[in-house]
Image: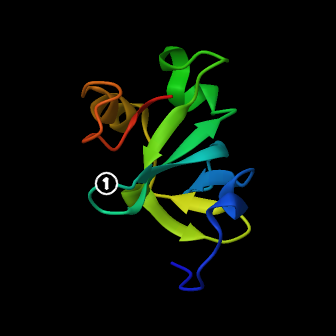
Amino acid sequence: MDETPQKMTNLVGREVYSNEGVFVGEVADVRLDLVDRQAVTGLALTQVNNELFGDLVTSEKGVILPYRWIRAVGDVILVNDVTLHDVIEEMSGPVGDPDEDSAVA
């Protein structure tokens, strides 16, 4: 990952792709943990790929990808391959639980 510190606002609007080149979505916001770790815990994506997320996400909602899935940040953001199975598994926890790294936004 790029070691140069960047403003978090610079991430907003960047496109997110899997390491296989599949469009995942666009960063709309950053999820932070300011209590325990004081770190970025996820990226809130909108305009998500319907083939990946299907009926899980409606047009007015998005997805929060766990930051641990991020492989590289540059002109675009690369994440580990995202499959519907991964997303369902991550979303199976309680939505809105501060201990969870992923949820439907």
**Residue 53 appears at what percent x and percent y?**
52, 27
Q: Residue furthest bottom?
A: 3
Front residue of 86/33: it is: 33
**Residue 44 appears at what percent x and percent y?**
55, 41
Name the residue rendered at 31%, 54% in the picture: 35
Name the residue rendered at 31%, 36% in the picture: 90
The crowding category of the residue bearing disc 1, from other C-alpha atoms within 10 Å (few below 14, some 14 to 19, many at least 20), is few
Front residue of 57/98: it is: 98
Which image quarter: residue 89? top left
Residue that carries the numbered disc 1 in the rendered image: 35
Name the residue rendered at 63%, 33% in the picture: 48
Please indicate, yes or no, whether residue 19 appears anywhere in the rendered image. Answer: no
Q: Which amino acid lies under the numbered mark 1 shown in the image of this protein?
A: Val
Name the residue rendered at 37%, 39% in the picture: 102
Colour convention of the picture: rainbow
Q: Along the horizontal axis of the image, is 83 left or right of 73?
A: left
Q: Look at the picture and state if 96 lies above or below 39.
A: above
**Residue 97 appears at what percent x and percent y?**
28, 32
Which image quarter: residue 99? top left
Q: Along the horizontal axis of the image, is 61 left or right of 97?
A: right
Q: Along the horizontal axis of the image, is 99 left or right of 7?
A: left
- Say how many tags the image has: 1
Q: Is mark 1 on a helix, strand or loop?
A: loop
Q: Look at the picture and state if 87 lies above or below 36.
A: above
**Residue 34 appears at what percent x and percent y?**
38, 56
Front residue of 19/27: it is: 27
Please indicate, yes or no, whether residue 44 appears anywhere in the rendered image. Answer: yes
Q: Look at the picture and state if 37 lies above or below 94.
A: below
